Image (cartoon, rainbow, N blue to C red):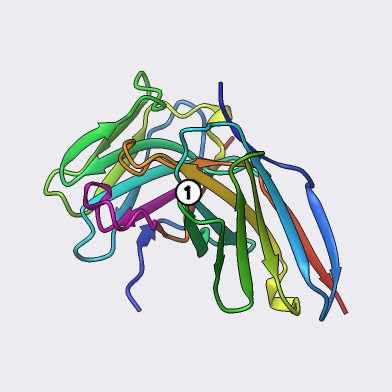
């Protein structure tokens, strides 16, 4: 069964350092999402891509966070500099494509657990 | 702002009993709802979805009910098993929002023997 891949699974970094997360969506999925999940809460959307284009980054703290999906396939989320409050689970999800209407089902990867010290 | 929320943070259920997880939503424009299950250390897993033109949908051991009048969503799990222990999230979206999901805070389901 196809899965969303994420790496690393765990990351510990010191504040003010840079950190990057990688996501490889399910093959053929045009829409890719990055979420942040604080323990005990639901995931919060950070950025959404349709192919290589950003369609929603309204919740992305753009002073320190950046995301790219250059070839419309895999994606990287970067934080620079990291702050203590960035400690969370970062989840990637993909779907066939919201514009197709029929499938809003999002498939999630295992996530990257970030700890900022 | 408008939000999705859950009534109970923790639900303890005896193995073999039925579970009911509730969710209230406030965005009357939402027309698509999904239930996700998240086990410890894993990403959310799709359980079942329902569109606003339906009031009930059944899957394998799960049923989702939608009451648009009171903006309420519920997930029923029949014959709850130890493997059902997890956090359950409801999520909503509107079909004109590029599939952007708004998640609730989650309900922890604990299945006891």
Above or below, A27 against B69 in this view is below
In this view of the protein, can residue A115 be seen by the observer?
no
Q: For the residue carrying disc 1, how many other residues have a C-alpha within 10 Å: few (<14), some (14-19), or many (20+)?
A: some
Residue in the picture at 59% in, 50% down: B90
**Image quadrant where one finds the N terminus of chain B:** top right
Between B102 and A39, which is closer to the camera in this rendering? B102
Residue highlighted by disc 1:
B52
Q: Where is residue A107 in the image (x, y as percent from the top left)?
A: 40, 60
Q: Is residue B50 above or below residue B76?
A: above
Q: Is residue A111 magenta?
A: no
Q: Where is residue B30 in the image (x, y as percent from the top left)?
A: 47, 38
Left or right for B106, reference A11:
right
Q: Residue at x 15, y 49 (%)?
A: A72
Kind of element beneath mark 1: loop
Magenta residues (range): A89-106
In this picture, residue A53 sits left or right of residue A75: left
Q: Residue at x 17, y 47 (%)?
A: A51
x 35%, y 42%: residue: B95
Outermost top residue: A63
């Amino acid at each position: 069964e196809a899965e969303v891949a994420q790496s690393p699974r765990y990351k510990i970094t010191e504040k003010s350092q840079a950190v990057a997360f990688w996501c490889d969506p399910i093959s053929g999925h045009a829409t890719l999402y990055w979420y942040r999940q604080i323990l005990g809460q639901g995931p919060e959307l950070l950025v959404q891509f349709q192919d290589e284009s950003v369609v929603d980054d309204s919740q992305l703290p753009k002073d320190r966070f950046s995301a790219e999906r250059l070839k419309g396939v895999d994606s990287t989320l970067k934080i620079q500099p990291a702050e203590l409050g960035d400690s969370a689970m970062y989840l990637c999800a993909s779907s066939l494509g919201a514009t197709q209407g029929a499938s809003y089902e999002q498939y999630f990867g295992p996530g990257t657990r970030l700890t900022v010290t | 702002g408008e939000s999705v929320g859950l009534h109970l943070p923790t639900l303890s259920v005896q193995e073999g009993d039925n579970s009911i997880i509730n969710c209230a939503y406030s965005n009357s424009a939402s027309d698509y709802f999904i239930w996700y299950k998240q086990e410890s250390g894993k990403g959310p897993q799709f359980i079942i979805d329902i569109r606003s033109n339906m009031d009930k949908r059944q899957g394998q051991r799960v049923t989702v009910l939608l009451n648009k009048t009171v903006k309420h969503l519920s997930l029923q799990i029949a014959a709850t098993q130890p493997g059902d222990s997890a956090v359950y999230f409801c999520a909503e979206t509107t079909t004109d929002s590029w599939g952007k999901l708004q998640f609730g805070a989650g309900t922890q389901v604990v299945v006891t023997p």
